[in-house]
């Protein structure tokens, strides 16, 4: 039986539901925590994928491709360390959330999973559904990149192209879920997805000898990596495996930057290059703002010109990422310019998606 879910606002509990009847997101009622000290991880542990950290994961390993343990490498040109999420099985950090979400779907007895996505989450869901033997439907924008569409189709999933805005895609998907029997594997709503992305934090700490950096910079759309990282670092501290929290610093795309807008009133330009984070109204907006406040963090908007310049620099240095990934190192420069990151701060930056699908 899947772990119990609880509404983040009214406290109502459910065995399995994609959102509360009051309209707010659900989270795990009692997320698991380990009792003992942190382990000494070996190369063999990486073969377990995310479930190398099974003491933190509230679902069985029903769908895994050995995802996780992405490289943590020095990036001298940025005076930072990069976490190479783009070398995941389907080329993005979304594999973490998809592995956990599809595993919960199996625990819940689902036969068909469905999600709405601009590309990476859909490709990940399709792949992990195939791994688990489930059918999948993915609602995508009509303008979705061909490479991402092919990734969905070749995993045996059914893409449903929707004209209009990214919100129109979500609305069409939700309508289909409410009218049918499909299990909504939403990367924005489903709490299992965030349990999966929390493993990003566990790995960062483990790869650093169970220490945490001063700051972590990640792209921020729906906030699946940002909020997952926050929950992961918080869980590590609660378990006594680490003794501090990094500052969490979000990188949004100009024109699609509701968190940065609320914090700073930044409403200039429009960055359509970073298509993976063009989210005007994130489902967990309040939780994202709480995570910023709890870590003395921040969120800023990055323009198209800065994104494209950073992308070129990344490619020249051997980091073959998609444009959305470039907003995080571009934001790192902006944070330093604003004095929010000092020259001697220890910073980890997530490179979230591969350039091979662009």
Image (cartoon, rainbow, N blue to C red):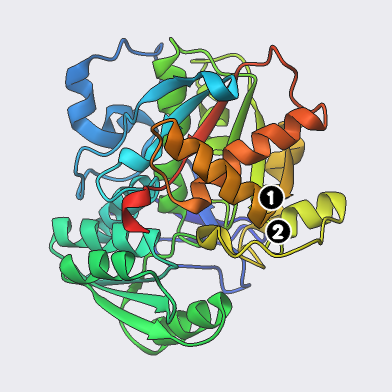
Question: N-terminal of the two: label 1 or label 2?
Answer: 2
Q: Nearer the viewer, residue 76 or 97?
A: 76
User: Residue 343's quadrant in the figure?
Assistant: top right
Disc 2 target residue: 254
Q: Nearer the viewer, residue 180 or 350?
A: 350
SS of the residue under disc 1 = strand
Res. 228 visible in picture = no
The residue at the point 46 percent across, 86 percent down is 175
The residue at the point 32 percent across, 65 percent down is 148
Q: Is residue 236 above or below residue 135?
A: above
Q: Residues within 10 Å of mark 1 (few under 14, many from 20)?
A: many
Horizontal side of residue 40 vs 140, given as left or right: left
Q: Is residue 281 above or below residue 69?
A: below
Residue 341, given in percent of the width and then of the height, sits at 74, 24
User: Residue 109's quadrant in the figure?
Assistant: bottom left
State if disc 2 and disc 1 touch (CB < 8 Å). Answer: yes
Q: Is residue 264 above or below residue 52?
A: below
Disc 1 target residue: 302
SS of the residue under disc 2 = loop
Residue 350, given in percent of the width and then of the height, sits at 50, 36
Q: Nearer the viewer, residue 185 or 330?
A: 330
Q: Nearer the viewer, residue 159 or 323?
A: 323
Q: Is residue 93 above or below residue 294?
A: below
Residue 173, given in percent of the width and then of the height, sits at 43, 80
Horizontal side of residue 195 vs 62, given as left or right: right
């Amino acid at each position: 039986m899947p772990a119990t879910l609880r509404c983040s606002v009214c406290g109502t509990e459910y065995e399995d539901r994609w959102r509360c009847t009051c309209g707010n997101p659900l989270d795990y009622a009692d997320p698991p925590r380990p009792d003992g000290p942190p382990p000494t991880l070996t190369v063999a542990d990486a073969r377990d994928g995310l479930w190398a950290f099974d003491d933190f994961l509230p679902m069985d390993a029903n769908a895994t491709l050995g995802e996780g343990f992405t490289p943590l490498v020095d990036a001298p040109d940025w005076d930072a360390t990069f976490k190479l999420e783009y070398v995941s099985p389907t080329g993005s950090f979304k594999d973490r959330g998809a592995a956990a979400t599809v595993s919960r779907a199996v625990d819940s007895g689902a036969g068909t999973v469905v999600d709405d996505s601009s590309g990476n989450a859909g490709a990940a869901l399709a792949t992990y559904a195939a791994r688990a033997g489930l059918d999948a439907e993915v609602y995508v924008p009509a303008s979705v990149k061909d490479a991402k569409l092919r990734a969905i189709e070749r995993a045996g999933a059914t893409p449903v192209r929707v004209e209009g805005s990214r919100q129109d895609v979500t609305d069409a998907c939700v309508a289909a879920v409410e009218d049918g029997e499909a299990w909504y594997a939403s990367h924005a709503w489903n709490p299992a997805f965030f349990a999966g992305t929390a493993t990003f934090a566990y790995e960062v700490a483990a790869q650093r000898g169970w220490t945490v950096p001063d700051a972590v910079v990640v792209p921020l759309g729906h906030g699946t990596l940002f909020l997952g990282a926050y929950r992961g670092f918080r869980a590590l501290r609660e378990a006594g495996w680490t003794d501090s929290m990094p500052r969490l610093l979000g990188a949004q795309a100009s024109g699609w930057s509701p968190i940065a807008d609320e914090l700073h009133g930044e409403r200039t330009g429009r960055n359509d290059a970073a298509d993976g984070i063009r989210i005007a109204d994130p489902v967990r907006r309040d939780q994202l703002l709480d995570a910023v406040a709890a870590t003395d963090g921040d969120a800023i908007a990055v323009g198209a010109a800065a994104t494209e310049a950073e992308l070129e620099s990344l490619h020249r240095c051997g980091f073959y990422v998609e444009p959305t990934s470039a907003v995080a190192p571009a934001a790192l420069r902006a944070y330093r310019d604003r004095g929010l990151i000092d020259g001697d701060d220890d910073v980890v930056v997530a490179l979230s998606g591969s350039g091979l699908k662009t």
